[in-house]
Amino acid sequence: MPDLLIELFSEEIPARMQARAAEDLKKRVTDGLVEAGLTYAGAAAFSTPRRLTLAVEGLLAQSPAQREERKGPRVDAPEKAIQGFLRGAGVALDDLEQRDTPKGVVYFAVIEKPGRPAAEIIAEVLEGTIRNFPWPKSMRWGSGTLRWVRPLHSILCILTDEAGASVVPMTLDSHTTCDSTEGHRFMAPGRFAVTSFEDYEARLKNANVMLNPAERADHIWADATNLAFAAGLEIVEDKGLLAEVAGLVEWPVTLMGEIDAEFLDLPPEVLQTSMREHQKFFSVRNPKTGRIERFVTVANRETADQGATILAGNQKVLSARLADAKFFWENDLRVAKSDLSVWTQSLENVTFHNKLGSQGDRIGRIATLSRDLATATGADADKAELAARLAKADLSSEMVYEFPELQGLMGRYYIQEAGHPAEVAAVAQEHYSPLGPSDDVPTAPLSVTVALADKLDTLAGFWAIDEKPTGSKDPFALRRAALGVIRLVLENGVALKLGSELTNAGWKLNPASALTEDWWQTRLKTVTEEDPVNEELLKLTDTAFGNEQLKKLVELLLSKHSEGDSNFEPFNQIRASVYDDCTSIATDLLAFLHDRLKVFLRDQGIRHDIIDACIEMDGNDDLTLLVKRARALNDVLSTEDGENLLQGFKRANNILSQAEDKDGVEYSYGADVKFAESDSEKALFGALDAAKAKIDPALAAQDFPTAMAAMAALRAPIDAFFQDVQVNTDSEVLRRNRLNLLSQIRSICSSVADLTRVEG
């Protein structure tokens, strides 16, 4: 069985595209081979800045012959049907067989396809792969039609078996497949031929090319760690940068340089970000002080002076970059120490969204929401409002303008420099969290408060302007914001009525929330015949959502004023209408949060139907309460007693529902034990009374495990009741009493969760 080696050699491929391109090459080629009948034992793909490589082991020498029978029309079918069958099968009429079937004599075509040589199939698959390769960006050069990420120089494609290596013949524009490649651009220029993957990999290494990106990354990290350790320092781990740098070099050579002393007092995050983003340098930290003192760069070649010239050039460029960072830092500090309000006021002129106002408007809403949320989160209301007003101030700073990824972190530094408490400063950095499912959740009450207010305002705002996520599209990251709310609430055990808070958030978004009768009366004093609607009213009616209601409000109140009518009832009606809209938005948004909660809890082993059963209960907008109930129900239903109780409940509910539908009455007036006949029936009366006596106080105390356990204890008496007692007996008195008893079962179990939503 031959082995296949493919190399696509080009100008430098962007590092961010290499790993995906290698996987795409592997998938497209191997899928095409298998589809054509060529199976294989294994395949591996590799990438360097200048090449994509695929090695396939144990490939069939040719595709197997195929024999296919196709059933056609009856022999007396219309001529058009027969000719259509002939064209589809690719055969002549004389090649068809006639066979008797239950439906008469039918034509059959026997199609035999001989096997094809592997080289022929590989050439077809490879050409299709190259011409249709899914690069994020590609280019065309010269006079050819081929598009590639960078100009393609050569295509190596060989099959190797016991007899040796042979080139798979293929021509693509001006490129003809060959058995040769090139080594390192500077250290080993020139082409050389290869005979197998092992020979290819070994000769590349001799030509100063490490083919495997994982090997290059390991080599870089080991050398960088050793250099830092020798100087008594440590490398700041950065897996993303390591993967990127491994895609920039074919022969990595690590070099450690120094940072000028004048820059060492910059915040370590500023140094690290500047070096990573602009220079692709690794930061080297002093473990004793936490300062970034040196850097590691990775060259793509060895030099006679051991990299001294490379380091000198890098240090010169780095100093220029850090001089800019130092300038930004010092300027920002002067503003922070004098008056942070300069930054917050400038955000009034920064649009957050054309339908949701400016960043300044948003900060005001978040600050008010933070004060409202402080009671639930246990934060100081005054500090929460202050922290919310300062948390986004650094968005106006020069440092964040240059390095947007430092937002929040720089705010923490600046707010501390302005003399505010550390817990207020920490909010600037922590209120953006969590950014994803693996991100840490803030635990400080102030940070939790402002983070919740920020995300609730985002959700309510985009829901209000009908910019909801659709399918896979979520341009405003609202699913992430919803997951953030869920994790903030659950992981901090916050007891919060989200329904009212979302309504509150929506109300703050609407300009109608600013209107009061006193406000209106004050504005009426400025109304003139020439200018019946002043500039402030015009601005109000054109802001945010709910425009139509506000315009109607202005029109109605102005007409009342012109008529000399002091009745402000239209004002109250419109405000009520807007508030109803906010409540409707909150209801829809809460359903969205419940859907995200199902996804979140699914990974913790809690089924959707169990969560649905708990969502149907009162207080479902308190996620902490809801999840406590769901986990307790999940624990009970995972036991044998819980499973059997569920079946007993469903049986009782089905019998009762059918009887109520048939009789047209509701059996909920209480059963009387004096009509009980059997011991099991009497025992069930006692068990239900005992369960209710435990469940009611447990639910009042939110002790769901106790309530669920008391419910599960009903399993045995319910089983015994159904085994011994016929509910729909001939005696109408006994039947009604037993149906009322089933109603008690339904009522008691339903007080814990809506078990009708749980799948049997």
Image (cartoon, helix red, strand yellow):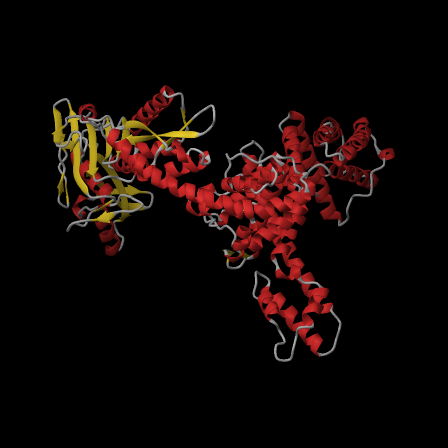
Q: Toward the viewer: 128 or 214?
A: 214
43 with respect to 411 (left or right)? left
438 with respect to 732 (left or right)? left
- x, y percentage for residue 570? 71, 69
Q: Toward the viewer: 55 or 419?
A: 419
Task: Locate residue 641: give its quadrant.
Answer: top right
Residue 584 against residue 221 in the figure, above or below: below
- x, y percentage for residue 94? 16, 46
How many discs appear? 0
Q: Quadrant of the C terminus?
A: top right
Q: Toward the viewer: 176 or 242?
A: 242
Task: Locate residue 488: give its quadrant.
Answer: top right
Q: Quadrant of the N terminus?
A: top left
Residue 356 against residue 495 in the figure, above or below: below
| Residue with the most extreme right position | 674
- x, y percentage for residue 672? 85, 36
Residue 182 visible in the shown view: yes
Residue 404 visible in the shown view: no
- x, y percentage for residue 424? 60, 40
Task: Locate residue 575: give its quadrant.
Answer: bottom right
Q: Toward the viewer: 648 or 466?
A: 466
Residue 333 against residue 62 in the figure, above or below: below
At 64% from the left and 49% from the top, the residue drawn is: 369
